[in-house]
Image: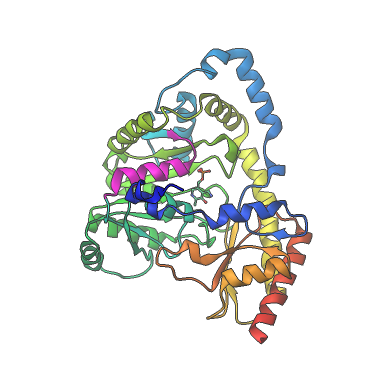
Amino acid sequence: MLNWDTMFASRSSRMRASEIRELLKLLDRPDIISFAGGIPDPALFPDQEFKQAYADIFAAAVNSALQYSVSEGYKPLREWLVGQMAALGIPCELDNVFIVSGSQQGLDYLGKLFLSPDDTALVTWPTYLGALQAFNAYEPAYDQLTPNGNRTPDSYRSAASTAGGKVKFAYLSTDFSNPTGETVDLDGRRKVLALAEDLDIAVIEDAAYQSLRYDGDPIPPILALEIAEKGHINDTRTIYCGSFSKTLAPGLRVGFIVANAPVIRKLVLMKQAADLHSSTINQMAISDVAARGFDAQVAKIKAAYSQRRDCMLTALDKYMPEDTSWTKPEGGMFIWITLPEGMDGAKLLAKSLETAKVAFVPGKAFFADGSGANTIRLSFSCANEQMIEDGIGRLSALISAEIGS
Ligand code: PMP
C-alpha cells in the first residue's frame, strides 16, 4: 500500500471526515428519528416553480444556459441581489455582488485569500463546522471570538504572534447560527466591528440563515452598520456571505458574497482558477424563481419551521431533566443543548442510536479548541410534530437515565 500521507501537502493533514456527513447516512434508517442533519425539508422545495423555470430557460435561452458564463455570476441574479441588499440596509452596486457555488465555496475562497499558515482566524466557540473545515486547509491558528465579551485587541494580537502569524479575520454567523441557533445582538455586532477596526482585520459575516426569522425584530447586518458609519460599501471591511440553500434549494449550489469591490475582484480571480463560474443554468433558474416569488417561498418555509421550533421547545420543556439547558432560537433550524458537566455528547449518541433511536450531532466538532463535549445540536427542520414529541421524549428519558446512573 502506498503511503499517501508522505506525498500529500501538509495542509491535507487537517482535512478529516466530517461527523455530520457520516451521520447523514442515518437519515435513511426508518427506525431512527433524526434531528441530526440540519438540511432543508425537501417537501418545502419550490419544485413546481423550478420545473417551470428550467422549461422556460430551455425554451428561450438554451444556448446561453448550457454555455460558459462570466466568473462574477449571472447579471440578472446579481441585479436582483442588489435590490435585496438595499432592503437590508446594504446599498451596493453590481460590482459588489459575486455569485459562488454555495456559500461554502465562498468560505473556502476567503480562507485562501486571507490565511497564510499560522495566521489566526477568530471564530466563536462553537462555530459552523463547515467554516472550520474550509479554513483548516489553510493551516490557521484559531482564537475565540466573543461578540459580547471584553477581550482586548492586544490580547488577540499577542496570542496571534505567539501562534506565529497575525489575526486575519473574525468569522461569525450573525443570525440563528449553526450550531446554536443564537443571534448576535446589536451591541455584539458593533463590538465585533470595533474589534476588527482596532485589529485592522476583515469581518466575515455568515448570513446563511438570515431570511429565516420567526419572531423578534430583525437586527441590521454588520455590513449595514458599517456602511451607515462609513458611507460607502467600498470603504468597509465586512464581507457578507449569503445563500439560497436554506430558502430555495441547496442542490443547485448557488450562494453569494457582497463586499467591497477590491475584495470581490480578488475573489473573482480565485473563481477563475477554481471553477471558472457557478453553474450557468442553475443561476438562471434561481434568478427566475427568486424574481417570481422569493417572499412567498420564504413565508412558506418560515410558517413550517417556526411551528416545528415551537413544538421542539415545548417538548424540551416538558421532558428534559433539570440539569440540562438549551437555546431559544428566534429563527433558523437549530436548538443547542448543554448536558450536565461530564456527560459526553458523542457517547450519548452511540447509546441513543441503540436504545432511544434518536439521532443528533454531538457538539464537540463545532469547537475549534476541542472543548464542548457536553453539548449536542438538534435540528427541527425535517421533523414533523409527532417525531419531535416522540424523539424528544425518548432522548430526554435517556439523558435522565444517564444522570441517574
Ligand atoms: N454557513 C452556514 C452557517 C451553514 O450552516 C451552511 C450550510 N450548512 C453554509 C454556510 C453553507 O451553505 P451553502 O454552501 O449551501 O450555501
Q: Quadrant of residue 98?
A: top left
Q: Is residue 217 above or below residue 146?
A: above
Query: Measuring 66% from the left and 59% from the top, which residue is drawn there?
Result: 35
Residue at 52% x, 57% y is: 178
- Is residue 69 visible in the rendered image? The answer is yes
Up the image or down, 51 lies above or below 253; here it is above
Secondary structure mainly formed by the magenta segment = helix
Residue 358 point in image, percent of width and height: 70, 64
Indicate whether residue 181 is drawn in magenta: no
Q: Residue, x 30% and y 35% (percent of image)?
A: 266
The front one of 60 and 352 is 352
Does residue 64 appear to the left or right of 204 in the view shown? right
- Which span of residues is magenta-colored? 99-116
Q: On screen, 226 above or below 35?
A: above
The residue most toward the front is 1
Place of residue 310 in the rendered image (x, y in percent of width and height, measured from the top left): 68, 62
Quadrant in the picture for residue 97: top left
Looking at the image, residue 378 lies above or below residue 89: below
**Residue 290 in the image, given as x and y percentages of width and height:** 58, 32
Magenta span contains residue 105: yes
Which sits in the foreground, 150 or 72? 72
Colour convention of the picture: rainbow
Quarter occupied by residue 392: bottom right
What quarter of the picture does the C terminus occupy? bottom right
